[in-house]
Image (cartoon, rainbow, N blue to C red):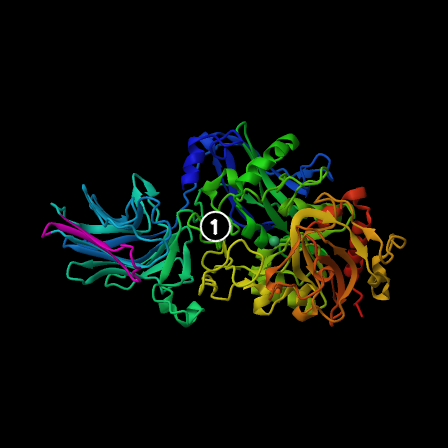
Amino acid sequence: MASLTAWRQGTSPTGAAIHQLTGYVDRWSARAGERIRFMISSAADRAYSLRFVRHLCADPNPEGPGYREIVMPTPLDGQRKGLFHAAHPGSYGRIEALALDGGGLRLSATVWPTLPARGRQTLIAIDVSGVAVRFEVGPHGGTQLRLGAETIAVDAPMLNRRWYAVEAVIDTAGGTLSVTQRPLHPVGTITDSGLGAAKAKLPKIAGTARVLVAAALEGGQIIAHYNGKIERPRIATLNDVTIGEWDFTQGITTQRIIDVGPQAAHGHLVNLPSRAMTGSNWTGAVHDWKSAPEQYGAIHFHADDMGDCGWPEAFTLDVPTDWPSGFYAAHIRNDAGEDYIPFFVRPAKGARKADVAFLVPTFSYQVYSSYQRIERSLEILPRARAWGALLETPGLNPEYGLSTYNYHADGSGVSITSMLRPQLDTRVRQMSLVDPVPTGSGTGRVNCDSYVVDWLDRAGIVHDVLTDHDLHEEGAAAIEPYRVIICAQHPEYHSLRMIEGFERFLDQGGRLMYLGGNGFYWRAEPSAETPHALEVRRAEGGIRVWATEPGESYNQFEGGYGGLLRRVGKASHKLVGIGFSTQGRHLGFPYAFTKGIKNPRVSFMLKGIEDAATPGAKFGDSGFMGGGAAGFELDSTDARYGTPPNALVVAKGIVIHDDYGWVNEDMLIHRHPRPREDWSCADMTFFETASGGAVFSVGSMTYVGSLPPENYGNVCAKLTTNVLRRFMDPAPFR
Ligand SMILES: [Fe+2]
């Protein structure tokens, strides 16, 4: 990565060229009594101190609700030896052993380069008995073969995003090398085909070879990563008998690459390249790779793909059985650096569960994580310094890879995100942005979700914590023991299994409080083989920074159709009554009660706010996120998409603001089908389910930031507490 080199050579604004002390965990959550592993990198192998803390409020804003952590002593605490570990982005395929008999070789593949002018990029690298064969994209974009001191290349560069059949022939006995490049779809007036050939004295290529696809191992480093698609890399004898041929149409859901040649020299993929990609033979007639896998034989490799950092374990925590369920972090620190690595503790197996559980949106955390936005990183720094908050961000540490909100360097969207790397924007004591409101905190993710923990704690409401990953893993069984499930600021990404879990929970009389915005929007699915990775294919509609290419909207990991949950019959409106309909700047605006608040069905909401809760009266006009309860990303009701007919809107946060636009999936022509007040708003919605349960939704991403003002005693907080207390009451809703 060029940007990485730049950072390494220079000095980052935090004063360090690399993150001085960071790490990651092997799982998002553990039950009390279970084990969680920590991988730590400390620059220059410096020692560091370790302690564990439980967070009640992670907001670092000195004018905020008040940072609250509880030190949780363990036998691991104290000084620990440090070791530096680097991150090595860039995906490739690796075949450990392929027998070569010393005859000539014919290497071939079909390729679709995406950064052909970027310099040397490996297609196939063979290392055997001290001989290195490099079949690659040369420094000028033409196909090239290097063998010992010999280099032959096609003069004409390949064009970006076009398919080529490329071949290299090594005639050891005849002493000739050749390389050819043939476009599958030639264009007029541009020459992008060619042949290079030379005579040379060639070494014998015999022994057990290590073969890499899309990268090369040189001097102990994996280098010269390729950007683009490769189909069917093949190594054959001079007279075209297959030695090894990797058919990427097989094992698409896996990280294995299958050799259909006589040696069955199967390999594996490193750093999660994209599979289920259209091949050179894709006709456009099929969109689901499962119905015609033979048209999906391409793997798209990127020099900035990132999977498992693979660092060795630094320490292991056996979560003490007496630790309460909650938000936790390992706090590591030395003179050079500092980090808080968050994790979540569930109650011990068999322990008595609370009635209420906070479902931490770890799918959404992970899908967002490692969002590289260097301008934002630089903007945050001065305030973070002043507040004593964490300084490091993904933008300052590009070696840990990208977010699914980024593009790869070749312009393709990032669809896979791994948790086995430092996720530097998913930290506690951290801000996500400089809040436009002077007293605002600019918090996101764990930090703003901790307002909910703080609120529950101050209200004396015993609660457990569990994560999206637990819900996906265990299905409805994970949440069934609870009467009330709380989802907070931004539960945007879910697997189908998780949605089905919620549905079952509600069918059984469960109560769901959705205290956020833009929730239940995209489908994200993990891989059965690599559960640390999540995949998001941004198909069709949806506010999104990138869109899937034609024919590539089905997930590689589990084969389902990617994109909006709405497109697979799981619109959030059906589940929580409302759905994403507008977004804009991180500003917060008040709600106003509707006449729905006077409906006897919701009289339980009124305790202590009887005077305030009159139709038309505003509330939620302060807060630590944008200065108000309705803002950033908002959800509204829409019967067409499945808002239940008994849904009652008790308040509306209408936001008419130049920066707030519609979601594109609602726009079929140039005019929105509904009046602006109906969609540019957060609809605070309540409905009862047929099984005696209920749902309460607020539909705004800044709502949780409006719980803390007045010591969690403002109208928003009181109303939310009233809802929770009624939801905790086992009496069925009728
Ligand atoms: Fe979002």
Q: Point out residue 551 in the picture as x, y percentages from the top left corner.
A: 44, 65
Quadrant where the N terminus is found in the figure:
top left
Q: Which of 446/685 is in front? A: 685
Q: Which of 215/376 is in front? A: 376
Q: What residue type is labelled 1?
A: Tyr
Q: In this view, does 184 lie to the left or right of 642?
A: left
Q: Mark 1 points at which residue?
A: 407
Q: In which quarter of the image is residue 492?
A: bottom right
Q: Which residue lies furthest to the left in this view?
A: 174
Q: Point out residue 619 in the picture as x, y percentages from the top left corner.
A: 81, 50
Q: Point out residue 177 in the picture as x, y percentages from the top left corner.
A: 16, 50
Q: Which of 657/305 is in front? A: 657
Q: Please give the name of the residue rendered at 45% of the width and 69% of the height, measured from the top-left corner.
A: 288
| Span of residues in magenta | 173-198
In magenta stretch: residue 194: yes
Q: Point out residue 684 in the picture as x, y percentages from the top left corner.
A: 75, 59
Residue 35 visible to an observer of this rendering: yes
Residue 96 in the image: above or below residue 604 = above
Judge the density around disc 1: few (<14), some (14-19), many (≥20) Cα neighbours within 10 Å: some
Residue 209 in the image: above or below residue 664 = above
Residue 390 visible to an observer of this rendering: no
In magenta stretch: residue 634: no
